[in-house]
Image (cartoon, helix red, strand yellow):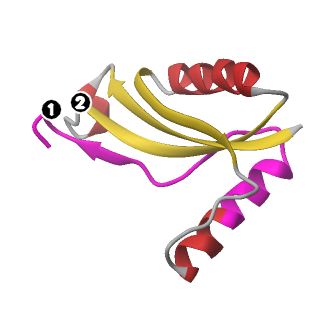
Amino acid sequence: MTIYWTSVEFDINNPTEYEDCIGGFVYLFLKAEDVQDAMTKIQGTIAEEDLSVKHIEFISPYDQTKWDTKDDQVLYDGLAKEAGDSNEIVWDQISAYESDDE
């Protein structure tokens, strides 16, 4: 199994449950057999939260990812490790928006 990370833009199906936000972005970290397996898991976890995938920017193995700051490196290495230690998809902090203009 490989640890992947992805950047997902999503629509919120019920904005009243998310302080009237209509969409957002999030990094997800997960363990998967390959990119197709990762895609299936990503779509499933997004749907479980009553969200809809709008755009997947990328799906990439995490192992060679370098971040601009040490703080980011520590944060995301930790999320990737958490994903590797479980069968759960690990979510970074969601960045939500209230309109498509944001």
* Magenta run includes residue 88: yes
Residue 93 inside the magenta-drawn segment = yes
x and y percent of residue 65 in the render?
Answer: 65, 59
The residue under the point 72% across, 55% down is 80
* Residue situated furthest bottom in the rendering: 70
User: Mark 2–mark 1 contact, CB under 8 Å?
Assistant: yes
Location of residue 63 with respect to 14 vertically, above or below? below
Between label 2 and label 1, give the one nearer the viewer.
1
Q: Which residue is mark 2?
A: 22
Label 2's element?
loop
Q: Quadrant of residue 24?
A: top left
Q: Quadrant of the N terminus?
A: top right
Residue at the image point whose x is 46% and y is 54% from the top: 93
Q: Earlier in the sequence, mark 2 or mark 1?
A: 2
Residue 4 screen position, x and y as percent? 71, 42
Identify which residue is drawn at 70% across, 66% down: 78
Q: What residue sits right under mark 1 in the picture?
A: 100
Residue 54 sits in quarter: top left
> Residue type at mark 1?
Asp
Q: Residues within 10 Å of mark 2 (few under 14, many from 20)?
A: some
Q: Nearest the camera: 73 or 88?
A: 73
| Residue 50 left/right relative to 90 | left
The quadrant the C terminus occupies is top left
Give the CA distance from mark 2 to mark 1: 8 Å
Amino acid type of the residue tagged 2 in the rendering: Ile
Residue 94 appears left or right of 28: left
Q: Element under label 1?
A: loop
Looking at the rendered structure, which numbered label has been put on residue 88?
none
- Residue at 49 percent across and 73 percent down: it is 68
Q: Is residue 38 above or below residue 25?
A: above
Report the span colored magenta: 77-102
Q: Position of residue 33 (x, y in %)?
A: 85, 28
